[in-house]
Image (cartoon, helix red, strand yellow):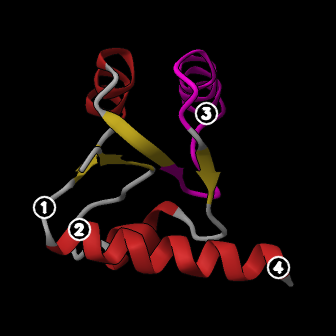
């Protein structure tokens, strides 16, 4: 139950960041942000490709950035972000 509340709070925060344009979308851009140290959190869809998941998790662990795996598919995450394409990886920039 507590984990569900945490995920819901993260989704609310993510929605605010999307409206403020402080979120970035895409594997390459998120990896670049992790390596530069400009990201605060990373979100992955439930059906994110395994290779992408491993790369993101590895670099995020090196940079001490939390990776949150959502229960939503990349299609649902694309709709959540109001995009016309699939979204597997999202990054929240620092404030």
As drawn, 29 above or below 82: above
What label does residue 18 carry, if any?
2
Q: Residue furthest front?
A: 95
What label does residue 2 carry, if any?
4
Asked whether the beta carbons under mark 2 and mark 1 sit within 8 Å of each other, the answer is: yes
Mark 3 or mark 2, earlier in chain: 2
Residue 83 is at least partly visible in this image: no
What label does residue 53 carry, if any?
3
Q: Is residue 42 left or right of residue 87?
A: right
Mark 1 or mark 4, earlier in chain: 4
Instruction: Report, in whole angstroms, how far the alpha carbon at label 3 lies from the one at label 2.
Output: 22 Å
Q: Nearer the viewer, mark 1 or mark 4?
A: 4
Q: Nearer the viewer, mark 1 or mark 3?
A: 1
Instruction: Report, in whole angstroms, how far the alpha carbon at label 2 lies from the one at label 1.
Output: 5 Å
What residue sits right under mark 1 in the picture?
21
Q: Give whichever of 27, 1 is nearer the camera.
A: 1
Residues drawn in magenta: 43-65
Instruction: Report, in whole angstroms, how far the alpha carbon at label 3 lies from the one at label 4.
Output: 24 Å
Asked whether the beta carbons under mark 1 and mark 3 sit within 8 Å of each other, the answer is: no
């Amino acid at each position: 139950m507590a984990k569900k509340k945490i995920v819901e709070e993260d989704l609310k925060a993510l929605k605010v960041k999307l409206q403020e344009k402080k979120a970035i979308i895409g594997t390459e851009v998120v990896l670049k942000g992790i390596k530069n140290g400009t990201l605060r959190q990373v979100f992955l869809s439930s059906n994110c490709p395994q290779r992408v998941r491993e790369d993101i998790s590895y670099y995020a662990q090196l940079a001490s950035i939390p990776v949150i795996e959502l229960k939503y598919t990349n299609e649902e995450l694309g709709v959540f972000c109001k995009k016309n394409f699939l979204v597997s990886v999202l990054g929240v920039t620092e404030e």
